[in-house]
Amino acid sequence: MVGRIIVPGSKSLTNRALVLAAVAERPSVLTRALGSRDTSLMIGALTALGASVDRDGIEWTVRPIDPSLAAPVTIDCGLAGTVMRFVPALAALGAAPVTFDGDERARERPMDVTISSLRALGVEVDDGGRGTLPFTVHGTGGVEGGPISIDSSASSQFVSALLLAAPRFARGLDLTHVGPTLPSAPHIAMTVEQLRARGVQIDTPTDQHRWTVAPGPVGALDTEIEPDLSNAGVFVAAALVTAGEVRVRNWPSSTDQPGDVWRRLAVAFGGTAELDGDDLVVTGPKKLAGVDLDLGDVGELTPVIAAVAALAETPSRLTGIAHLRGHETDRLAALATEFRRLGGDVDELDDGLEIRPRPLHGDVFRTYHDHRMAHAAVVLALRVPDVFVENVVTTVKTYPNFAPVWERLVDA
Ligand SMILES: O=C(O)C1=C[C@@H](OP(=O)(O)O)[C@@H](O)[C@H](O)C1
Ligand SMILES: C=C(OP(=O)(O)O)C(=O)O
């Protein structure tokens, strides 16, 4: 594939900016925020809590939650981890019962730590004993806060959620993660930086799994949202598997987004990735090399990385990603199943995948309502004839226009 692409705004930055604007002192303006299913769900959730978002072209004005508007509501989380994990802590600050539910699969995603951590902070949560969605948060108009320990090994979003609400707790928060692993650490670092950018005092003392947040106001911040570098990965992958050249416009020169690691991944697979002014230019190698990588920090990139690996000339091993079993689908099982359907040679590990080179053939590729499974499928389809991607429209979760943009580039 040869082409130029402008990727829409980052899901993770947009939903953090929306949440923080909703608890800020004054209105905030977000420029080039992502309009997609996950961010629309976030807007719906914050609006239900009494915030407002006016969209005017690329500028969105967010007015903070008006506590006088608190009323019993039900919030649809869809399949958005950021909504189901971040918003319950905000609901706890309000004075009305808020019920959370979502897609069928959302009811299977790990939510126990959201529920238990709110309870540990003194908030009543009614989950019918399930430990999953749906559940109701019974806010009483404020949260005391203070010290708390949680096991965030199933998702970094449990930590991020508490940190985002913490400045509004009466005593702030002293949060410690106790558990075997902590996935997606860069997403937690992103949360910390977004809080600091709004004047919140947050320290990460000696032990890197502890965060202390001082109580205090969250400053309003007018901010421009960077392009989504995780979603840019599917275009980087396209260049890699076709020995092509893709130019991704407006790649930030410094960023907190984990997707920035695509620059190093391109090289690991044997390609090149160079910043050229504001663009990242990626070229694919003649011979695609396999990789041996711990992806614990960047788990959300796995499906596309796995697709590139399946087309490489030497074996690959992807580890550190047991938590992907709780994502939009069990991504380790889904990738192994779908790659095998195309003739692939894949072993599912407890915490990853081993992928060995083997010629692939066309068949249906199921996507399990997972945007990144669809991205994996279209990358394979660049090299394997007659791959039929089921429900490519599921990409609207984080990239509303993906399908037509991809078709245009493939046909160019
Ligand atoms: O905080 C965030 O914006 C995210 C954190 C990560 O979640 P996990 O730690 O559950 O993988 C990531 O995979 C997800 O796509 C977005
Ligand atoms: C895991 C992901 O999303 P979510 O925010 O729903 O957890 C993802 O986008 O890869």
Image (cartoon, rainbow, N blue to C red):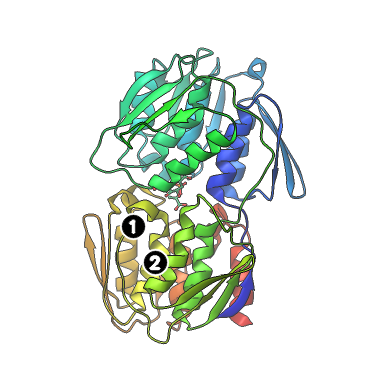
Query: In the image as oriented, which residue stretches furthest toward the front?
Result: 206
Please state which of the two labelled residues, at mark 2 or mark 1, is closer to the viewer: 1
Q: Determine if the C-beta at disc 2 is less than 8 A from ligand 2.
A: no
| Quarter assignment of residue 129 | top left
For the point 30% across and 78% down, the residue is: 343
Image quarter hosting the N terminus = bottom right
Looking at the image, which is closer to me, 369 or 32?
Answer: 32
Of the residues under marks 2 and 1, which one precedes in the sequence? 1
Q: Amino acid at mark 1?
A: Leu
Q: Position of residue 310 (x, y in %)?
A: 34, 75
Residue under numbered circle 1: 295
Check disc 2 and report its element: helix, strand or loop.
Answer: helix
Residue under numbered circle 2: 305
For the point 43% across and 75% down, the residue is: 380
Disc 2 to disc 1: CB gap under 8 Å:
yes
Check disc 1 and report its element: helix, strand or loop.
Answer: loop
